[in-house]
């Protein structure tokens, strides 16, 4: 047990070196990921692959995101300790754990009850205090809004309007909230960051291409 924990730690360090070499420069993200045991968020039979830079199946045709993608989305979020962040698509709970390690207040919505239950159990075993719920994440979490950041970990055909309205408006104390969302169809999505600039205004920036499982809302993919 002790030995395998040590092996996992060594593999995790090596993976993070690779991710850093790919251009993830945010040390806070790398440090947070170095503290989360990804092997505990995947099925026992896949633990030996937990530190390959791959998305892996987590049941119900869903996947835990590729580590370099988790690092990239978290870097784009650019959240500060104490910020409140909403994740859409809890999945295994791994991304939520990374956000907790960044010192954020973490809320996460998952549409599959089975995945929600499993994520809740592993996050509480590891003492991560994310607040989870089952529901349609495209609606956001209105009673907890506004958020400093919203991170969508499933591919959307278009930007869900409800999420835009739940981003914090900029003030003298804080910048506008940021929505990180992969936009596109099943063939691939473009990572997109939308920053709230005032009551009505939003800035959009586009980044690289990715391949996420679809965001499913109201029986359709959006
Ligand atoms: N962040 C996850 C990866 C999730 S994969 C992790 O770290 O493991 C995408 C997840 O989004 C899947 O679990 C899927 O069930 C969920 N999902 C898809 N559409 C959704 C919706 N409308 N609301 C909430 N969750 C959704």
Image: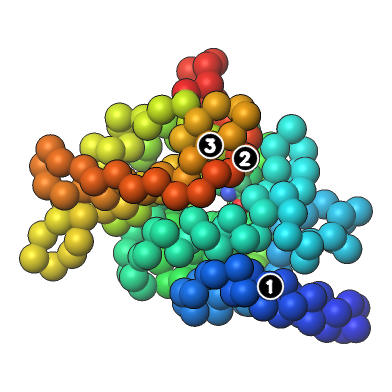
- Identify the mark nearer the N-term, 1 or 3: 1
Residue 209: % across, % down:
55, 44
Q: Secondary structure under badge 2?
A: loop
**Residue 18 circle label:** 1
- The residue positioned 91% from the left and 53% from the top of the image is 45
Q: Is residue 2 above or below residue 99?
A: below
Q: Is residue 202 left or right of residue 220?
A: left
Q: Is residue 50 above or below residue 61?
A: below
Q: Is residue 23 above or below residue 202?
A: below
Q: Secondary structure under badge 1?
A: helix
**Residue 211 circle label:** 2
Distance from Cα at disc 3 to Cα at disc 2: 6 Å
Residue 164: % across, % down:
28, 38
Is the residue under label 2 in contact with that under label 1 (CB below 8 Å)? no
- The residue positioned 70% from the left and 37% from the top of the image is 62
- The residue positioned 20% from the left and 61% from the top of the image is 175
Q: Is residue 123 visible?
A: no
- Identify the mark nearer the N-term, 3 or 2: 3
Q: Is residue 24 left or right of residue 44?
A: left
**Residue that protrudes farthest toward the top in the picture:** 219
**Residue 189 circle label:** 3
**Label 1 Cα crowd, 10 Å radius (few <14 / some 14-19 / many 20+):** some
Q: Is residue 83 left or right of residue 207?
A: left
């Amino acid at each position: 047990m002790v030995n395998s924990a040590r092996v996992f730690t060594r593999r995790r360090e090596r993976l993070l070196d690779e991710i850093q070499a790919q251009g993830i420069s945010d040390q806070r993200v790398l440090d947070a990921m170095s503290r989360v045991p990804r092997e505990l968020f995947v099925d026992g039979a896949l633990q030996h692959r937990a530190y390959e830079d791959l998305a892996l199946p987590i049941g119900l045709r869903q996947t835990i995101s590729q580590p370099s993608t988790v690092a990239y989305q978290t870097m784009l979020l650019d959240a500060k300790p104490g910020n409140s962040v909403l994740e859409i698509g809890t999945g295994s709970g791994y991304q939520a754990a990374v956000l907790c390690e960044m010192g954020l207040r973490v809320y996460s919505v998952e549409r599959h009850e089975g995945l929600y239950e499993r994520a809740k159990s592993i996050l509480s075993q590891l003492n991560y205090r994310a607040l989870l719920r089952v529901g349609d994440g495209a609606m956001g979490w209105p009673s907890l809004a506004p958020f400093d950041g919203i991170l969508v970990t499933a591919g959307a055909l278009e930007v869900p309007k409800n999420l835009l309205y739940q981003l914090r408006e900029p003030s003298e104390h804080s910048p506008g909230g940021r929505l990180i969302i992969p936009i596109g169809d099943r063939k691939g999505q473009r990572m997109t960051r939308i920053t709230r600039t005032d009551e009505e205004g939003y800035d959009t920036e586009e980044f690289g291409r990715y391949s996420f499982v679809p965001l499913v809302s109201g029986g359709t993919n959006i």
